[in-house]
Amino acid sequence: MTASEPPTSARVLAREVERRRTFAIISHPDAGKTTLTEKLLLFGGALREAGAVRARRANRHAASDWLELEKQRGISVSSSVMHFEHEGFRVNILDTPGHKDFSEDTADSAVMLIDAAKGVEPQTRKLFEVCRMRGIPIFTFVNKMDRMGREPLDLMGEIEEVLGIDAVPVNWPVGAGKDFRGVYDRVQGKLMLFSGGEHGKKLLDQTDIEGALGSEAVSEALGVFAREVEESLELLDGAGAAFDLEKVQAGTQTPMFFGSALTNFGVLPFLERFLQLAPHPGARPSDRGPIDPVDHGFSGFVFKIQANMDPDHRDRIAFLRVCSGRFAKGASSTHVRTGKTLRLANSTLLMGKEREEVEEAYPGDVVGLFDPGVFRIGDTVSDEGGFAYAGIPSFSPECFARVEVAAVLKRKALEKGLEQLVQEGAVQLFTEPGAGSASMYLGAMGQLQFDVMSHRLKGEYGVELSLTPMDFKLARWPQGEFDPEIFRYSERIKVVEDRDGRPVLLAKGDWDLDRVVQKHPELRLSETANPALLEASH
Ligand code: G4P
């Protein structure tokens, strides 16, 4: 670089993009996401002590009362972003909560964490679908190998069958349960044996033995496990799909790893191969075509809004993923939906509850911006303006309830609270056309989101939320011309409006929708409010 070149030249930007890995961990509660995250942070030196993520989680509960619910449910509801450096890579982990959130829409790849004893569980499956829809690479980590679980081949078969994706083991476990000794890397022809260490407290020593399977050194080190491992691997070589990086990148093949987050067996071998194979931030689809991370000035989109993170200050934080160019604190940029100029002051990077000021950020990074009330989920911020990212489609809720307002004393506070919390995106608000706020309905992916909403309305706005469950199961957005009159007398279909005044059909089941489509073949129904965005993201 010559002295005259600015420090943020395209070359610096390209290098920063190339070394970034932004991923989400998708799993069912209890599979070990917290434990794995903690171990990854330890390798990156972002944590000095194991147990700190858990401790931080516990502190957060103390600090904010609604998070108490998380503790009771044992489910992580709030979301944060963690980052660390490892061997020249900058790693961003998006902490996806146990329920539907939008972090998967933001990640460049996903790590699917599976409990070796339980296999593919419902929540994993749901989150997997979101990742598959976006076509992002999915890496599988089979956890809890220190316990007797299911046979590795059996788990592979389940992934292929249930998820419909080829699973290709990058490494293979040597032993299981208390005899889990190590992993054999099939690609590198390297055996890694673990030893020593206090369980989970310290990074374990790892012995690497180079040599193909069947070589003297490897066979000797494998000891009694030699035959077993050799047989499995022969089987895989003969019958399994061959590793294909292109297929991995297209999300049709998942590289599989085995380990134990708790005892720290297999985490480092996983991390290192993952960092090599996972993609760096690439071009993102927008309504003006793909936006390359290096060829454009700063841009990003808001994927999450959280109100009242700090109970002492009624603040809202908009989480923005940087997609192109360099983010600089204090610079001005354009809020594309409104055309307003924004000053990107007060940018924080969040690590658990602690806030860290960010001076600059690059594509793949997430910054938290103080939100004076202008942001909505999916909003684009861009120096160039003129394009909007194909952001977050709002999915059809599966659980609906009526807000009972008659008995509410603090109606204004209820409306304000609902309006603000709904902006966070986990719960959608619908109203009955013409009935004003007298008839409000909430829709979410599950009951948990309603519980969180009630808890927070009470804690943060001082109002009791009274809900009556409704037996609707689906929401569909009619596209194009639509006459609500045709459903006026229908008992099984209800027409409501979303926050943007778009008509929405609530239906009790697929059967009802099939009938609607048969009777009104001219109707085009979409599962999301903004199907154009969904198409553009493919
Ligand atoms: P989550 O975030 O996915 O919900 O899971 P979390 O890491 O909290 O782990 C859930 C439980 O599984 C914890 O036990 C944790 O210690 C255990 N666990 C995680 N990884 C492994 C592993 O590799 N092997 C074994 N044997 N256990 C593992 P807990 O008893 O519920 O909590 P704690 O008392 O250990 O904190």
Image: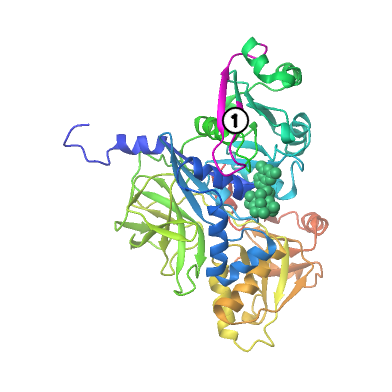
Mark 1 belongs to which amino acid?
Answer: Val
Residue 353: image location, x then y, percent: 48, 61
Q: Is residue 184 above or below residue 197?
A: above
SS at badge 1: helix
> Viewed as shown, does residue 436 lie left or right of 474?
left
Pick whichever, 525 or 83, lies toward us.
Answer: 83
Q: Quadrant of residue 120?
A: top right
Q: Quadrant of residue 89?
A: top left
Residue at figure coordinates x 75%, y 18% from the top left: 235
The image quadrant of residue 75 is bottom right
x, y percent for residue 319? 47, 57
Q: Is residue 129 visible?
A: no
State the quadrant of the C terminus.
top right
Above or below, comparing residue 291 to residue 516 in the picture: above
164 relative position to 502: left or right: right
Disc 1 crowd rating (10 Å Cα; few below 14, some 14-19, many 20+) is many
Magenta extent: 193-214
Q: Is residue 375 visible?
A: yes
Is 403 placed above or below 242 here?
Answer: below
Q: Residue furthest left?
A: 4
As for residue 360 lying within the magenta part, the answer is: no
**Residue assigned mark 1:** 248
